[in-house]
Image: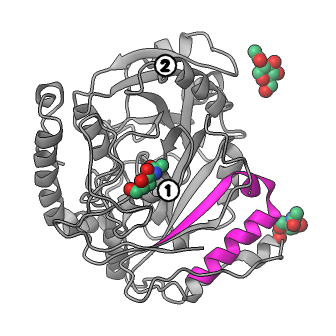
């Protein structure tokens, strides 16, 4: 297994790679043990992997939106350990949708298996370790072992999941590591104890502010090998036959015009329902009983019009769905979640959680000429309904990254002017968060 070293990309030498994922709505779930009611937020970012990680090259991103990596302003390099576990599903099967996920190392447990069972296609997971945790640390070894036990215990993991480690701002040598084989199959032995977890509220805020969210999305994405991708967050679950239905639509539309994002609606569902919804009929009943609602309803970043018409429309069957309508990208806070071709731009790693780190990708896609097509039938749900509670921890994180955020915004606008000079009028002005 090899390791790639990511380093600071200087002005000249930006090399990067990036892989990614589109984040779905809020990344908040990664930190749920740290902060209970997170309310919503989005993020953007760029990361730089230099020196060859996934192959380093000049930072290029083309005006057609097919940039493969992003330059980064991260001070120190990251160290990447790719394919710590690797899916057994054929890598040759490129006509699938890879689910790209990212998670903090201290948030992984067997709860992940439910999410794996819920997704039919390949999954690429980036696991992020904070600064100071070296590749030889017990944390890294333990998470690797845990994933291998999942692989031994759970056929879905074995078949679908590939996991990659991102060691942030790695100070020591990043040489690659051969993890020992693991023969254990007992999930109960898979639990890790982490002695160095942040303890005080301030340390937790520090950890969140330092989480390399967009490097992680970009890593997961770069390691996925399918023609189609979906970039989501932990705790995002999908309606039945989601992948098959979206693949049907992707083959119909994206082979003709790859610059369409197939947008799915997203919801929150109360955790105490007898069964989570598998189709829109069941979802509609839950909404009528006040057991489900649009995702982050009170913030509006995910609301999509024509919901009643969507419920009324006939279902397209198990193997396809189609476009309900194309929605113009007119409002800079809209963070649509979608399936797309794998060649969309990477997440801008200058943007940090929680300041539009995920939305920034939609901004760039707008400038690159992508259309956002709202799809019939399919949806994502998040178990648990969020209420509008102020979250002090997230506010603190926001305050910590706001300076970097303003800089990111300025650089982003400069880059948009250079790379997509003609689409200025077609998109909102990206003037604030
Ligand atoms: C991964 O990154 C490398 C280096 O930038 C790039 O050449 C490659 O095309 C990327 N792969 C994907 C699937 O984006
Ligand atoms: C998986 O782990 C559970 C919990 O430890 C255990 O009961 C079960 O037997 C294991 N299954 C397999 C196939 O190893
Ligand atoms: C869809 O799948 C279900 C089982 O998942 C099956 O009963 C049904 O016949 C399928 N419908 C079509 C149109 O293929």
Q: Distance between the residues labelled 1 and 2?
A: 25 Å
Magenta extent = 140-166
Residue 154 magenta = yes
Residue 388 vs residue 408: left or right?
A: right
* Label 1: element kind: helix
Of residues 385 and 327, the one drawn nearer to the viewer in this rendering: 327
* Depth order, front residue of 99/272: 99
Across and down, in percent, residue 320 comes to: 62, 20
Q: Name the residue under label 1.
A: 220
Residue that appears at 32% across and 28% down: 370
**191 in relation to 219, above or below:** below
Q: In which quarter of the image is residue 5?
A: bottom left
Which corner quadrant holds the N terminus? bottom right
Q: Where is residue 336 in the image (x, y as percent from the top left)?
A: 38, 35
Q: Specify whether tag 1 is near ligand 1 (CB below 8 Å).
A: no
Q: Is residue 317 above or below residue 302?
A: above
Q: In this view, does 264 lie above or below 382?
A: above
Q: How crowded is mark 2: few (under 14 residues within 10 Å), some or many (20 or more)?
A: some
Would residue 22 be counted in the magenta stretch? no
Label 1 CA crowd tier, 10 Å (few <14, some 14–19, many 20+): many
Dominant SS of magenta comes to helix
Q: Is residue 426 left or right of residue 383?
A: left
Total tally of numbered discs in the picture: 2
N-term mark: 1 or 2: 1
In the image, which disc is placed on residue 253?
Answer: 2
State left or right for residue 111 relative to residue 151.
left
User: At 24% from the left edge and 63% from the top edge, which residue is drawn?
Assistant: 398
Q: Position of residue 203 (x, y in %)?
A: 35, 81
Q: Residue at x 67, y 43 (%)?
A: 92
């Amino acid at each position: 297994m090899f390791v790639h070293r990511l380093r600071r990309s200087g002005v000249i030498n930006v090399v990067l790679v990036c892989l990614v994922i589109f984040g779905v709505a809020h990344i908040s779930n990664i930190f749920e043990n740290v902060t209970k009611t997170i309310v919503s937020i989005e993020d953007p970012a760029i990361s730089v992997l230099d020196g060859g990680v996934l192959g380093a090259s000049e930072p290029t991103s083309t005006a057609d939106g097919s940039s493969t990596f992003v330059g980064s302003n991260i001070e120190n390099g990251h160290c990447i350990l790719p394919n710590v576990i690797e899916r057994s599903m054929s890598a040759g099967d490129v006509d699938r949708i890879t689910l790209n996920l990212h998670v903090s190392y201290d948030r992984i447990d067997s709860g992940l298996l439910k999410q794996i069972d819920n997704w039919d296609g390949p999954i690429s997971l980036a696991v992020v370790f904070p600064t100071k945790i070296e590749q030889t640390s017990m944390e890294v070894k333990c998470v690797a072992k845990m994933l291998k036990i999942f692989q031994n215990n759970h056929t879905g993991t074995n078949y679908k999941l590939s996991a990659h480690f991102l060691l942030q701002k790695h100070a020591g040598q990043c040489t690659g590591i051969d993890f020992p084989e693991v023969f254990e199959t007992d999930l109960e032995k898979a639990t890790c104890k982490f002695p160095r977890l942040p303890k005080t509220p301030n340390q937790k805020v520090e950890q969140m502010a330092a989480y390399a969210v967009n490097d992680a999305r970009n890593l997961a994405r770069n390691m996925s090998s399918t023609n189609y991708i979906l970039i989501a967050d932990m705790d995002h679950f999908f309606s039945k036959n989601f992948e098959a239905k979206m693949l049907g639509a992707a083959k119909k539309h994206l082979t003709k015009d790859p610059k369409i994002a197939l947008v799915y609606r997203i919801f929150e569902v109360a955790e105490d329902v007898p069964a989570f919804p598998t189709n829109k009929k069941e979802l509609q009943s839950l909404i009528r009983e006040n057991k489900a609602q649009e995702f982050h309803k009170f913030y509006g970043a995910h609301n999509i019009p024509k919901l009643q018409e969507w419920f009324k429309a006939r279902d397209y069957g198990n193997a396809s769905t189609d476009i309900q309508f194309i929605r113009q990208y007119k409002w800079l806070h809209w963070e649509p979640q979608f399936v797309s071709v794998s060649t969309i731009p990477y997440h801008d790693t200058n943007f940090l959680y929680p300041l539009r780190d995920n939305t920034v990708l939609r901004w760039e896609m707008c400038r690159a000429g992508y259309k956002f097509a709202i799809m019939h039938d399919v949806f994502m749900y998040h178990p648990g309904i969020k209420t509008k509670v102020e979250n002090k921890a997230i506010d603190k994180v926001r305050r910590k990254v706001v300076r970097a955020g303003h800089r990111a915004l300025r650089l982003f606008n400069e880059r948009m002017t250079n790379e997509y000079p003609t689409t200025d009028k077609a998109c909102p002005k990206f003037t604030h968060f």
